[in-house]
Image (spheres, helix red, strand yellow):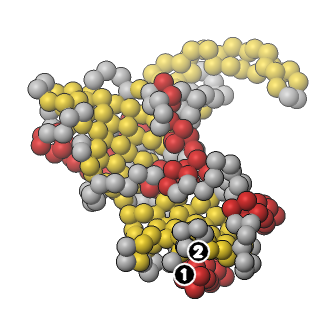
Amino acid sequence: MGKKGDIISFYCHCEPICIYAQVVELEEVWHSNKLGKKKQPVLLYVEGADLMSKNSKEGKITMGELLPREIQGWKAEGKDEIYDPQTIFDYIDGAGEVYRSYNFKKLLARRFIKEGQPDIVADLFDMASSKDAFGVFTHDLEGDDAGIGQGSTYKGGLLSFWKDRFFVSLYAEEETEDAKNALFALGKIVDSSVEKEGEKPDIVSFLPQEDLVEKNVHYFHNHMILNYHFYVSDENILLLDQQTEVALGVYRLKDEKSYLLLVRYPEIKKASRAYESFTEIYMPDARKLGMVQTEDLKWTGAKIKNDFLIIIFNAPSDSFAKEMIEKVDKKINQI
């Protein structure tokens, strides 16, 4: 603990912050822990305390510092609002479950105001991992590439992008030319403030690139998000949960779309159970093992490979379905 007059540091139990202070007064009190009770000196009063984040000491900055307080005449209004997975529904009603499905850790919301201009709302999500930051970005890919972060879209006054473990949503309540310019300027500041880039989920790289629609690659975990992008079943027949990793790619051949689904399970046994569940419920009339022609004359195929399950939907032919599955199989073999 140190003695009177010493400069000490200690960590707050409720936040990852380090406090530097000068000891002014000490008192011995009884302290209890799992090993029993013992007397130890406890700091009662500090002077000249300097509160800084552990990340700041390491040269990084906090979430609030990623956003400026003013941009092109728009000024931050009031205090930032902070939400977690339990309180997010107080801020975002229906869409809150989407962010929870990607394991988000914290949301910082800041509103900017400027007289005679629409308000700008900045939402900064700490997704805890770059995989889930990328994933939540892929949930809605409508819009034009804005050239910001590691992937971005802009449409109708909404600028979204991801970088490292952060997903950023910047929204102008009305699209004006000035507001759009401010959104892009704000996005570039946040982009430059996040110093490093994060890695995409490696499962996405197993999707064959030929005929792949780049704007239709999605990464997620559970069947609620799967059904949003491609409806399979009301029931969770693929046994998806927060521990599964899922990549969905859309392939276009002429005017037809095929969907390639790749699921990685935490263990091989669960992958086997998922394969059995899917084939029994979704394709019980398969004439060939793991391959069936559906009522719309398209083909669905499935194959289990170690802890992976590979499924293709809406394939134009059985040969195309087999070809796509084998391409993924070869990529998995290279792991």
| Percent of width and height locating residue 32 | 81, 21
| Percent of width and height locating residue 149 | 34, 56
Name the residue furthest right: 36
Residue sitting at 53 percent across and 27 percent down? 87
Residue 237 as seen in the image, left or right of residue 327: right
Res. 299 mark = 2
Badge 1 vs badge 2, beta-carbon distance below 8 Å: yes
Residue type indicated by callout 1:
Ser
| Percent of width and height locating residue 16 | 56, 35
Q: Quadrant of the C terminus?
A: bottom right
| Percent of width and height locating residue 72 | 15, 38
Nearest to the observer: residue 310 or residue 131: 310
Nearest to the observer: residue 6 or residue 258: 258
Indicate whether 25 appears above or below 113: above
Residue 236 as seen in the image, left or right of residue 50: right
Nearest to the observer: residue 278 or residue 124: 278
Residue sitting at 51 percent across and 42 percent down? 99
Q: Quadrant of residue 173?
A: top left
According to the picture, the residue beneath numbered tag 1 turns out to be 317
Badge 1, how many Cα within 10 Å: few under 14, some, many 20+?
some
Residue sitting at 55 percent across and 63 percent down? 247
